[in-house]
Image (cartoon, grey):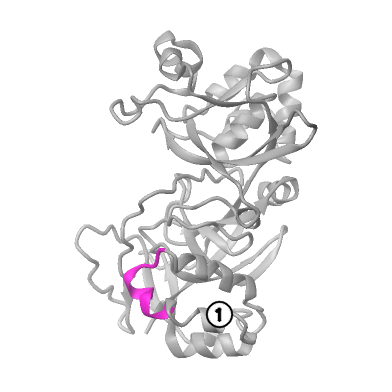
Amino acid sequence: MAVAALLASCAHPPQPPSPPVTGASGRPFAAPAGVQVKSRWVAVAWSELPGFQDDSLTEAWLAWLKSCERPGPAFVPLCSELPRLSTASPQAKRDWMTARLQPYRIESLQGAAEGLLTSYYEPVFKASRQPAWGYGVPLYSAPPTLASRKPWFSRQEIDSLPQARAALNGREIAWLADPIDALVLHIQGSGRLTFSQPDGSSRTVRLAFAGSNEQPYRSVNQWLLSQGVTKINPWPDATKAWAADNPQRVRELLWSNPRYIFFREEVLSEADAAFGPKGAQGVALTPGRSIAVDPGSIPYGTPVWLASRGGVANLQKLVLAQDTGSAITGAVRADYFAGTGVEAGQLASRFNQPLRLWGLWPK
């Protein structure tokens, strides 16, 4: 999510915990009450971070400044220093980082230092404000009963039960042409819609995550594989091709994933358009510099050194932990925000490669 990613939510994240680190003895420090510790952090030298001397850090600084809009307590003092370094040279930024931060290798509780990197993106689709010829797939805002009924109706029940249909009547935000496009929006958790205006111009808005039915997420790709389909990439083009060849089974395909996402519409200013949607930290994501993590392993707002080599990309760079998702669980696990639009989607759909992470924490 690439396909693996199911990126989720935004508003009101909990205060991030202090990182569960280990000293030279390897014994974890005590975690704050109520915090589920899913990783151990082992102090290392800066020389262990591959490519640390090569990253320009400029885009990463933009992402870090975004995190400083909602910093965790440990990062508040650093956030007062970041703006003056925005125009500094890469070496000046590195010197400041090495003076103010300590790198920690992030491992599982069993000591595994290698995990998995996938990717996600913000799709863009043409849409209609009203159901019309060629636009028959609705996208909904959250129903009033979403908080009182948990889990809410499944995807199949939303399509077939009168009670579920009645709860969503009048809550349509927009209509898409293709049910697979709607599924893509549900999997990514947010996106942009472009509407044709009467004067021939177009207007683009952002759809942000507003809640889910809290049903379990099931991979549509895994369902296709179970049906004997061998070509599932590139996503979603291969899925659309299968749907075109099997129109009578499209609902079966969609219903294989019970989870359903509800949205809210946001105005997309020119400044907003350069960034992605807000992640779980509550700040806008920066293409190529924001990752989704398991917050039980890495607190929101933490600067992270990421290293991943594979067939899609070789990455050695500074990123910020600013989002999460239901498929992003475990210590060394991340979802890389690739950006907005078709090219970002093509990149995100192919990401599935080894990962190492280092958390950077104030000294």
Position of residue 139 measured from the top left corner of the image (x, y, whole percent): 56, 27
Residue at image position (51%, 70%) is 65
Position of residue 349 measured from the top left corner of the image (x, y, whole percent): 67, 46
Horizontal side of residue 357 vs 199, given as left or right? left
Tell me if residue 249 can be seen. Answer: yes
The residue type indicated by label 1 comes to Leu
Residue at image position (34%, 74%) is 74
* Residue that numbered label 1 is attached to: 49
Quarter of the image where the C terminus is located: bottom left
State the residue in front, 285 or 107: 285
Tell me if residue 351 can be seen. Answer: no
**Would you say the magenta stretch is mainly helix, strand or loop?**
helix
Horizontal side of residue 94 vs 148, given as left or right? right
Q: Is residue 56 magenta?
A: no
Position of residue 66 measured from the top left corner of the image (x, y, whole percent): 50, 65
Q: Is residue 80 above or below residue 145?
A: below
The image quadrant of residue 72 is bottom left
Residue at image position (53%, 59%) is 291
Q: Residues within 10 Å of mark 1 (few under 14, many from 20)?
A: many
